[in-house]
Image: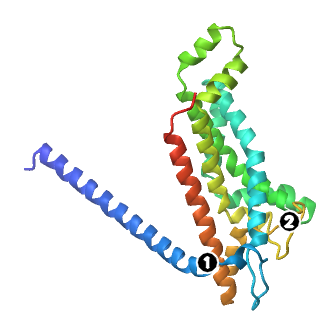
Amino acid sequence: MISKFKKRKLINYFNLSASIVVTAFGLVMLAWILTVLFGKGFQHINWAVFTQMTPPPGASGGLINAIVGTLLITFFAVLIGTPIGLMAGTYLAEFGGKSRFSSAVRFINDVLLSAPSIVVGVFVYAILVKPQGHFSGWAGAIALSILVIPVVLRTTEDMLKLVPVQMREAAAALGAPRYKVTIDIVYKAALSGMFTGLLLATARIMGETAPLLFTGLNNQFWSLDMNQPMANMPVVIYQYALSPYEDWQNLAWAAALLITISVLVMNIIARYSLKQPSSR
């Protein structure tokens, strides 16, 4: 008869071993993917990638229009989604409390946080692209902004709740109105964490392909008109990787590497910023 102590030790040993094996498997797969990506991607990174537009099959070219399109769509997505997420997160942390409305907002935010991005793309296609009769950069930015909102909201709420109540009480005791306390005291104390949430939201949307397939689509030519289809790297990767043309596949590897490096850098900055104490 095995004693309870030995049984618990066996269960603990089994769970620990299983966790180590699964973690090692995930790390090996990640290392394999990154090794292949960096190995093939660096081969095709050259000056033309940053100076020439996406080419037709059999011609030389680059990714400049896709790079600029990605930056524009991402910029406007963050510009649209961040204020909404910031204000909603502030309401939940500072004013909403445990009311039914706040609980409903949190539930909807959790749903959005875990919703497949393709659902967001189809939604924006139905309400914006189809009525307009054409794809556009604005539709892509709005679709991505919907993905930005829940990340910024959750991070803002969590960071504001970490600010000690005593700081609010001290400011209120000096006669500061509630909005002044929130903006001048609470925001400044939680600034690094809120900035981290913004970076994480930006990193999340930079590689999203599904929403842009239904909204921004693609454009082989140089265009800064957000009312028209706009080139972007996620869709270029999707289309070029599936093509039978080797030159397009090479550009897909280069684009995938650029996005991976960008997301990696933003995540590193976000993690580093989170560890830094607030300046005030």
Left-right relation of 165 to 226: left
Q: In this orientation, which residue lies closer to the viewer: 10 or 276?
A: 276
Res 175 label: none
Left-right relation of 1 to 81: left
Res 253 label: 1
- Could you tell me how far apart the alpha carbons at marks 1 and 2 are, in whole angstroms? 26 Å
Sequence-first disc among 1 and 2: 2
Residue farthest along the right direction in this orientation: 132
Residue 65: x %, y % from top left: 79, 70
Q: Residue at x 69, y 61 (%)?
A: 118
Residue 131: x %, y % from top left: 91, 59
Residue farthest along the front direction in this orientation: 47
In terms of image quadrants, where is residue 57?
Answer: bottom right
Residue 84: x %, y % from top left: 74, 39
Q: In this orientation, which residue lies closer to the viewer: 222 or 240?
A: 222
* Residue 243 visible somewhere in the drawing: no
Q: In this orientation, which residue lies closer to the viewer: 65 or 152?
A: 65
Residue farthest along the bottom direction in this orientation: 58
Residue farthest along the left direction in this orientation: 1
Please count the marks in the image. Answer: 2
Element carrying mark 1: helix
Element carrying mark 2: loop
The kind of residue tagged 2 is Phe
Q: Dot 2, crowdedness within 10 Å: few (<14), some or many (≥20)? A: many
According to the picture, the residue beneath numbered tag 2 turns out to be: 135
Q: Dot 1, crowdedness within 10 Å: few (<14), some or many (≥20)? A: many
* Snapshot colouring: rainbow
Quadrant (top left, top right, bottom left, bottom right) of the C terminus: top right
In terms of image quadrants, where is residue 156?
Answer: top right
Q: Residue at x 49, y 41 (%)?
A: 275
Q: Is residue 116 above or below residue 219?
A: above
Q: Is residue 185 above or below residue 206?
A: above
